[in-house]
Amino acid sequence: MQGSQDILESPIEFLKGVGPIRGDMLKKELGIFKFRDLLMHYPFRYVDKTQFHKINEISSESDAVQIRGILRRVETHGQGRRRRLVGRLRDETGAIELVWFKGVHWLEKNLLVGGEYVVYGKVNAFKGQLNIPHPEIESINVSNNKSASTFAPVYPSTEKLNQKGLDAKGRRKLMLTLFSKLSPQHLPENLPQYIVDKLRLPTHFEALKKIHFPTSQNELDQARKRLKFEELFFLQYRLLEVRKKRKGAIKGHVFSTIGDHFNQFFKEKIPFELTGAQKRVIKEIRKDLGGGTQLNRLLQGDVGSGKTIVALMTMLIALDNGYQACLMAPTEILAQQHYAGIGEMMEGLDIELAFLSGSVKGKKRKLLLERLEAGEIDILIGTHALIEPPVIFKNLGLAIIDEQHRFGVAQRAKLWAKSKPYPPHILVMTATPIPRTLAMTLYGDLDVSVIDELPPGRKEIKTLHRTENHRLRVIGFMKEEIAKGRQVYVVYPLIEESATLDLQNLMQGYEVMEREFPKPDFQVSIVHGRMKPADKDFEMQRFVKGETQIMVATTVIEVGVNVPNASVMIIENTERFGLSQLHQLRGRVGRGGEQSYCLLMSSFKLTSDAKERINTMVRTNNGFEIAEADLKLRGPGNIVGTQQSGLLNFKIADLARDSKILDTAREIASRVLENDPKLERPVHQGLKSYLMKYVGKVAGWGRIS
Ligand code: ADP
Ligand code: MG
């Protein structure tokens, strides 16, 4: 396209003050190729020159400060290269030293003892004395209010760029040059006016200008709000577009009836009253199932929130409509637990239930597969073995995946192929709560249901933080609990990088336990990743059966062990675990009727992050709260493990802090899609052309092709 907007597409080296050498450097170091890239490279902080500090407020903790006062003394010290200029600035509260090593000659000539100055710089503590090395200094007369009224932008830079004159000052100059060439027509409004008005946002142009050159905190806040909104809005628009297209294009089996299976179970078998959250979620699912589109829903619920019964009742609806259902779990142990638990709840109902995993072999397997294909099996529970090609259903209508994060795209694709003419309805369940904002982004094209309520009568797990000097009392406490017939986990960290040392710690811990809890009165189990699977299983089973009272282990017990009689979880070196892992580990206790405890052992000295993690664990049992805290501490990329699909690479939005803006963005995006799906209305033309030019399509989670 020709015209006024092209200037932003110009190669960066054509900007005055850049040229080929700096241009190359900007490309290599920062990925800045065009004028537009430079524009989109926002400052990462600002130096607030509107605020003045009093000298007595300055401490070694202070970062950069701005002070004003009278220059009291100027002296040179040292010789040759060590020569430095030391000045002393005094205000009504005190005095501080200013030190320069460069430009000494010039400063010496120009600084006026007794004159009034504004000084800006980073505070340094040297032998207990505070000083400001290399401050910027300006006489009050000269500076007037000019420098005293701006927020100076600071850009992410590198050593190489600094050397080529593209330091903070140089970058500021480039931005000024760029803006001297730009007017609003180069950056036309990309949101419809009614949104801009409703949210009281500055214009697109104004926001970009003010993000680089705000003149007040308020202007900066407004610019940020607008650019965060834009970023979140366009992504949500794309995600919702994918979701809408899928719903339109992909038909689903219609489960229109609630029949005998569901009703009989509900009337005669259901072992407890459903919680409000369970009822709500079942309603949401039923609505999807009957609607003629494919159910593609993520069900989030903390450990113990009762997802299984929701899965079971959803499967009964499939059966009532003449379809088969399957439930997949990531490990053999979990799959078997589901098979046993669900089998028990369904006893007496006329339903054929079967189990399939890699361990089902030979004749047994052959028979099972035949019966499945003939439609004699209603519900198949198992591991990922059940999505392998030789497994053929007669009419699979619903697939439930427990612990979604362990299943990849390829596996989901295999699942789709199992059902004709439509893909099966898919419900993915996860016990790893994902912060809401993250779910809306990563799974923004899926429907999400949340069980945010635990069944009644659950005793809160008591969580305590203890250090090494409490060790004897901790052992005393274990003895009391074991005397009551309870069992105890003791968990050690074990990571690849320090595996040998970690293993030693674990073995030492085990020896301590054997000494404190001697045979034959007590039995201690040990399980770690280096053991043979068969030995691991054997030890695990002994603990499950109650033959041993203490299980010393690494995090291998994180998934899949259910021992309701275990009431104490002791975590060693707590500071080395991440929050979500700690929460998963704690979820291993509190499964029976007894009061349960989680003891977080740590060393006395802790980093502030570790303290924050431990305090969070002590403060709350709520997995969603913990996930939110985790998001704030570690950032979104680390939480999901990888920088998935670029969906999380925001320039300015922050999923830990901008949940309100995200909600608004999603809501408005969804309304636009509903009211003007093809963006035909005149008010949407700016939005449409911006989307087409600058906002890439997203793949979406639920789509498999
Ligand atoms: P998770 O969400 O971790 O899979 P489960 O479905 O295994 O949780 O449920 C945990 C425990 O809570 C089970 O023993 C289950 O029988 C019980 N439970 C589930 N829902 C309720 C309820 N509404 N009232 C009482 N107990 C419930
Ligand atoms: Mg479960």
Image: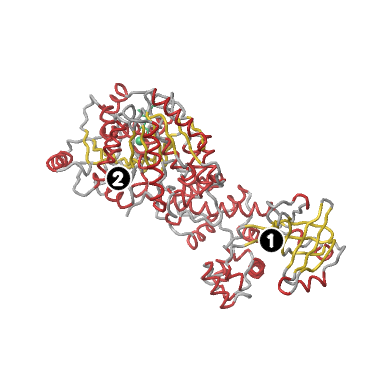
Among all residues in the image, which is located at the extreme left? 363
Disc 1 is placed on an element classified as strand
Disc 2 is placed on an element classified as loop
Q: Which mark is residue 531?
A: 2
Q: Are marks 1 and 2 in contact (CB under 8 Å)?
A: no
Among all residues in the image, which is located at the extreme bottom? 20
Of marks 1 and 2, the one in the foreground: 2
Q: Mark 1 Cα within 10 Å, few/some/many (few <14, many 20+)?
A: many
User: Is 40 situated left or right of 413 in this image?
Assistant: right
x, y percent for residue 67: 77, 56
- Report the quarter where the C terminus lies: bottom left
x, y percent for residue 460: 47, 28
Q: Earlier in the sequence, mark 1 or mark 2?
A: 1
Look at label 1 and name its amino acid.
Answer: Ala
Q: Quadrant of ligand 1?
A: top left
Q: Mark 2 Cα within 10 Å, few/some/many (few <14, many 20+)?
A: few
User: Is 628 situated left or right of 315 in this image?
Assistant: right
Q: What is the quadrant of residue 594 in the picture?
A: top left
Q: What is the quadrant of residue 175 in the picture?
A: bottom right
Which residue corresponds to mark 1? 152
x, y percent for residue 587: 41, 35
Taking depth in this image into account, of 603 and 439 the one nearest to the observer is 603
